Amino acid sequence: MKIVIKTITISFILLAFNIASAQYGNSGMYGGSGMGGGMNRMGNQQSMQNTNNYGRNKSPEDVEKERAENLNKSIEKLSKDLELDDLQIIVIKKEIEDGSKKVVAVTKSESSQEDKIKEIEAINEKMDRTINTYLSTDQKVKYKKYIEERKERMEKYKMSRN
């Protein structure tokens, strides 16, 4: 569950980064004094094209690579925080990968933002139940705290969308 939360959090962070990057045009609109600094004009145009539609113009390979990197970071943190053994890491990673793919599919759907959030919450809840079956009693307590933190972040996100 912690991984799902991390995956969603990372997705939101990446989305926010892409929004900010597109908003500032990677220094294209502000005479080179923005985030891109020393890029030439052609580089700025290319950079702006790559961030249009909140990063949707990325190649499928780039998107998958980014997702895999984020997933690995989440697994590492979860492994450390919960002190997972090798077998737990394998099965939980698989569960999180499956959940992550489902979340990506939901975010790409034509549903309303509210429906997407509800679907993502359902995916997270199912993943949390499954992950809990692989955890010890002590790990479950730590994971429950992780879930609560994720829910708080989701509530903050929902409130910021309104």
Image (cartoon, rainbow, N blue to C red):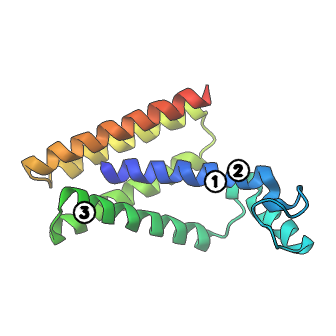
Residue 64 located left or right of residue 25: left
Q: Determine whether label 1 and label 3 are within 8 Å by CB.
A: no
Three-letter code, disc 2:
Ala
Q: Which residue is mark 1?
A: 17
Q: CA distance from mark 1 to mark 2?
A: 5 Å
Residue drawn at (74%, 52%), measured in percent from left and top? Answer: 53
- Quarter of image, res 111: top right
- Quarter of image, res 83: bottom left
Residue 43 located left or right of residue 118: right
Residue 30 located left or right of residue 131: right
Q: CA distance from mark 1 to mark 3?
A: 26 Å
Q: Pick whichever, 13 or 116, lies toward us.
A: 13
Residue drawn at (68%, 66%), measured in percent from left and top? Answer: 58
Q: Pick whichever, 106 or 85, lies toward us.
A: 85
Residue at disc 1, secondary structure: helix
Q: Which residue is mark 2?
A: 20
Instruction: Find residue 85 and report its horizontal and vertical position in percent.
Output: 15, 67
- Taking the view exactly as shown, the residue that stands out farthest to the left is 137
Instruction: Find residue 48 and report its horizontal and vertical position in percent.
Output: 81, 61
Residue drawn at (66%, 70%), measured in percent from left and top? Answer: 59
Q: Which residue is mark 3?
A: 79
Instruction: Give the mark, 2 or 3, whose residue is nearer the N terminus.
Output: 2
Q: Determine whether label 1 and label 2 are within 8 Å by CB.
A: yes
Three-letter code, disc 3:
Ser
Instruction: Give the mark, 1 or 3, whose residue is nearer the N terminus.
Output: 1
Q: Quadrant of the C terminus?
A: top right
